[in-house]
Amino acid sequence: MPWAVVTGGSRGIGAAACRALAEEGFDVAFTWHTNDAAACVTAQAIRDAARQSRCDRVDMGSLDEVAAWAGAVAEELRPQVLVVNAAETFRGALESHTPDVVRRILDVNVVALVELARHIAPALAASGAGAMVTIASMNAVRGSSNSVAYSASKAAVLGLTRSLAVELAPRVRVNAVAPGIIETDMNAEPLADPDTVAAVKRSLPLGRAGTPDEVGRLIAWLVGPAASYLTGGMIAADGGGLAVFPVS
Ligand SMILES: NC(=O)c1ccc[n+]([C@@H]2O[C@H](COP(=O)([O-])OP(=O)(O)OC[C@H]3O[C@@H](n4cnc5c(N)ncnc54)[C@H](OP(=O)(O)O)[C@@H]3O)[C@@H](O)[C@H]2O)c1
């Protein structure tokens, strides 16, 4: 069976993408960073779907680790699909955005993505049905307080997604998914606040946060034959947040 490669498959959206890809018939190789117990749960879910799994610890902030892992999976697995999902966020006011903070976020969320694509794209192209999905964010297209570096990194993800889609066509399709607010560890703190939950209910047409599985299934659909004419696009998985006029 074809291999799909997913970064940050131990938790949240990445774990859901691994499960959905396995259900669609892919063998799945994924990375984790700090949470080996969660990685084991994802690996078991892939095996429960009767697919092979491989998981490796990689810090996306270490370009040496990223390059070594990407080179290895490209050569050994010849994957058809790459999902670049792992990312770090930093919440803080402008004055706390020191150059080290900004560089770390850009290294993990942008430079590592390019490095992964650089090593793995040739295998995707050779597979005959290559597809890549990047994970942007509503922060790529909307402003919010306390997220200067994260927003910059996600806007960069959209830009490089479009350019990769052009450069790698027609052999590899490249699309971005832009989640709104999804129930993952990244949002555990805000979603524990009843005021935030009430604001989500009030402001989003669908009236709730999304689940990781809702995004994971979208990712699996995007790399499959039903999305064969889509490349260079961004699909918002945001409960309608981008569509609604803020004071309507
Ligand atoms: N949740 C949302 O509402 C939301 C909204 C917009 C965009 N997104 C984007 O969706 C993607 C997934 O987010 P999530 O909410 O699912 O996050 P999450 O639940 O916090 O999971 C993050 C995943 O990335 C891995 N990871 C984090 N830092 C890493 C690093 N430096 N090196 C390697 N792996 C690292 C984690 O590994 P360990 O588990 O091993 O630590 C974990 O598997 C991200 O690109 C995020 O920016 C999320």
Image (cartoon, rainbow, N blue to C red):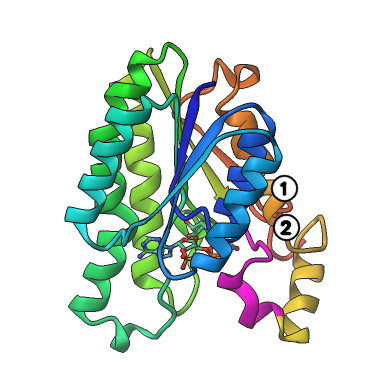
Callout 2 crowding tier (Cα within 10 Å): few <14, some 14–19, many ≥20: some
- Label of residue 214 in the image: 1
Magenta part of the chain: 180-191
Question: Which residue is located at x 57 percent, y 64 percent?
Answer: 38
Q: Quadrant of the N terminus?
A: top right
Residue 230 relative to residue 183: left or right: left
Q: Amino acid at mark 1?
A: Glu
Name which quarter of the figure residue 222 lies in.
top right
Question: Which residue is located at x 44 percent, y 80 percent?
Answer: 91
Label 2 secondary element: loop
Mark 2 CB near ligand 1 (8 Å cut): yes
Label 1 secondary element: helix
- Label of residue 210 in the image: 2
Q: Amino acid at mark 2?
A: Gly
Residue 84 relative to residue 50: left or right: left
Mark 1 CB near ligand 1 (8 Å cut): no
With respect to residue 71, does 227 lie above or below?
above
With respect to residue 115, does 184 lie above or below?
below
Callout 1 crowding tier (Cα within 10 Å): few <14, some 14–19, many ≥20: some
Q: Nearer the viewer, residue 187 or 27?
A: 27
